[in-house]
Image (cartoon, rainbow, N blue to C red):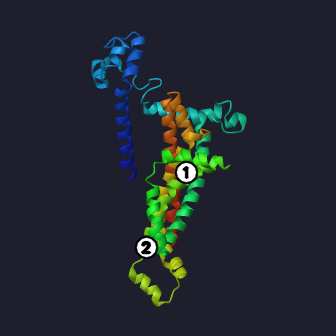
Amino acid sequence: MNKLGPVITVILAIVAFWYVAAVPMNVQETLTAAERAGVAVTPDNARERSEVGRWSLVFQNMDALGGSWNVERARLPSPHQVLTEIYHSTWDEEVNGRRGIVNSGSFSNRSLVYHSGVTLGATVLGFLIGAGFGILLAVGIVYSRTMDRSVMPWAIVSQTIPIVALAPMIIVVLYSIGIGGMMPKAVISAYLSFFPVVVGMVKGLRSPDHMQLDLLRTYNASKSQGFWKLRLPASMPYLFTSLKIGIAASLVGAIVGELPVQRGGLGARMLSGSYYGQTEQIWAALFVAAILAALMVAIIGWIEARTLKRMGMAV
């Protein structure tokens, strides 16, 4: 309860700010609708209103702003419009829709449930590839001075390349050699998720101090014994922290990878929403993506708590 109070307070503050921001953002559309309904607005034609600032329009037409939070094709849809869109594109589509799982036996390709599944599959596959590669790379960097000097700088440089520019090239190259389907998106996800795992794992593997390492040497322990009995257990808190960052980055990579392909997924859903001016659809997909990320981070946190408790590193 002590944690729930501040969280609810922040959510309420964000929702209140959102409602306030929707008024100036949608003022042009609101006044146009009011004018069509016979309400007197200032200025009295759309061309003149387009040359006036949004806040000026708000203060000149305080009595005509009642529809600001229910505008069709709003620039900034209000929170209840986004929640309504989420309901229609999940529960309503699957239960009452002609192509929903209740009536057709399979998820509708118009529902966010279907698109979330497409994105989730690419995210998990990419995360597993990226995390596995990152862990192997970190072990090599810690135990090989050559890899430390040669690979680590390139790993850092790789993250300076904008993924939006790199993703289409990755997809084109992989499609040209016959690799399609989920794999190109998974590769982009792996590209974004491996770096935090590398950094966290290297930090964790190097966390044992000199006294602990010297103690192992006095026991004549081999490098593999030092790894399994000291370095790897010490790296677990760092690893799980980096995995939480990596899974969120992996989701971003999957969504970016869906933009050029447009064959399903939350990224394709956002892009189609921008094509047709359906901002509620964009925001609904964005919210579902955030919920997916939160759930995946929570699952890793749950595994972390049980793993560290089993290792005696947490209560």
Q: Nearer the viewer, residue 62 or 274?
A: 274
Q: Nearer the viewer, residue 196 or 284?
A: 196
Residue appearing at x 57%, y 49% in the figure: 170
Give the crowd class for mark 1: few <14, some 14-19, many >=20 residues within 10 Å: many
Between marks 2 and 1 in the image, the one whose residue lies nearer the viewer: 1
Amino acid bearing label 1: Ile
Q: Is residue 300 visible in this depiction of the protein?
A: yes
Residue appearing at x 43%, y 86% in the figure: 215
Give the crowd class for mark 2: few <14, some 14-19, many >=20 residues within 10 Å: some
Amino acid bearing label 2: Arg
174 relative to 102, above or below: below
Q: Which residue is mark 1?
A: 188
Q: Position of residue 245 (x, y in %)?
A: 46, 56
252 relative to 112, above or below: below
208 relative to 76, above or below: below
Would residue 29 appear left or right of 285 to someone viewing this image?
left
Disc 2 to disc 1, C-alpha distance: 28 Å
Q: Position of residue 192 (x, y in %)?
A: 50, 54
Q: Quadrant of residue 257?
A: top right
Q: Which mark identifies residue 206?
A: 2
Quadrant of image for the C terminus:
bottom left
Q: Nearer the viewer, residue 4 or 109?
A: 109
Q: Secondary structure at mark 2?
A: loop
Q: Nearer the viewer, residue 118 or 182?
A: 182
Q: Residue furthest top?
A: 38
Q: Is residue 241 visible in this depiction of the protein?
A: no
Q: Secondary structure at mark 1?
A: helix
300 relative to 218, above or below: above
Residue appearing at x 53%, y 47% in the figure: 167
Would residue 110 appear left or right of 142 to someone viewing this image?
right
